[in-house]
Image (tube, rainbow, N blue to C red):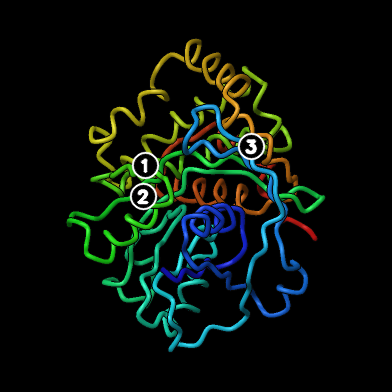
Amino acid sequence: MKILMFGRGVIATMYGWALERAGHDVEFYVRPGRAATYGDAVDLDLLDTRRRVWGQRVVEKWPVRYREALEPDHDFDLIVLSVPHHRLAEATAFLSPRVGQATVLVFGNIWTEPLAAIGAVPVDQIAWGFPQAGGGFGVDGVLRGALLPSVVFGTFGQPPTERERTVRQAFREAGFRLQEQPDFHGWLWIHFVFDAGLHSQGLRLGSLAKLAGATGDLREALLAIRELLPLLEARGVDLRRHRGGVLPFRAPTWLTAPALAWLLAHFAPARVNFEAHSDLEAEEPREICRDTLAEARRLRVAVPRLEAAEPSFAREVTG
């Protein structure tokens, strides 16, 4: 399969590497002028857990190919669109006249209505998924992160189309286990407020990396997520369909906060993921918190912990 990763972000790079390792032909679309800045290889330091629970460390310089233009008559079979949620409208506006015959995998956070988020990209050419990986580029340019063994896929009330089944097969062949979410709409929004709760407390400390060893602050993060559950219900999410997913946030925090702290200290994939989120100027965590708070205010849902953390994410990122 010929695959175009849209952008060279953390998720695009990690999954592009995994897909190429599985025999697929992978390129990256980047903005004009970026290819020379990035160079012809990516330095990787990854914990790959697809075959081993505790992971296999991968340290290598991975040669990559970039393109800075995309014509409508391209021959890509799949375009993987993994961009911050607040950049999705811009990305789909760019892709809609250039999608050609490719399937577009929307692969990340969404806080708007999903079908509205894709703009003019034909809905019958869309597949929906969510990565189970994380990390960050260090100041030395090295991508450090953890690649988990599963990938989440879902649909909106319909069985997967032939295109969607083909995308799933590509990830399966790359060694990933597939998790199907029958209510993908609700699952996406639950994940979004999960991120908002964690980032609100991470930003208060300076970064998500500083949250990893702080049991008291992890407790505040769990409580912040709990306060956001009524917001999901106000938006129409049936939390009864996601009992297992929201149970950790409804359970007593004297139990869950120490358990989460232990996990981050002793389970290498989780620790590596958190520790890599050390960029004090990262834009996406602030945008997640801002948009969640704006929606809570619009719907008049009380979210006191997110409100209290607002000074840490209200400012604009400089540089």
Q: Quadrant of residue 247?
A: top left
Q: Which numbered tag is attached to residue 172? A: 2
Mark 2 in CB contact with mark 1 (< 8 angstroms)? yes
Hey, what amino acid is under mark 1?
Arg
Image: 34 above or below 43:
below
| Quadrant where the image shows the N terminus | bottom left
Q: At numbered mark 2, what does the secondary structure look like: helix, strand or loop?
A: helix
Hey, what amino acid is under mark 2?
Arg
Q: Which numbered tag is attached to residue 169? A: none
Horizontal placement of 274 versus 241: left or right?
A: right
Please give the name of the residue rendered at 76% of the width and 74% of the height, measured from the top-left corner.
Answer: 36
Q: In the rendering, at what x and y percent does residue 11 appear? A: 55, 53
Hey, what amino acid is under mark 3?
Arg
Tag 1 residue: 177
Q: In the rendering, at what x and y percent does residue 75 appear? A: 43, 81
Q: Earlier in the sequence, mark 2 or mark 3?
A: 3
Q: Earlier in the sequence, mark 3 or mark 1?
A: 3
> What whole-number distance in Å separates the C-alpha atoms at marks 3 and 1?
19 Å
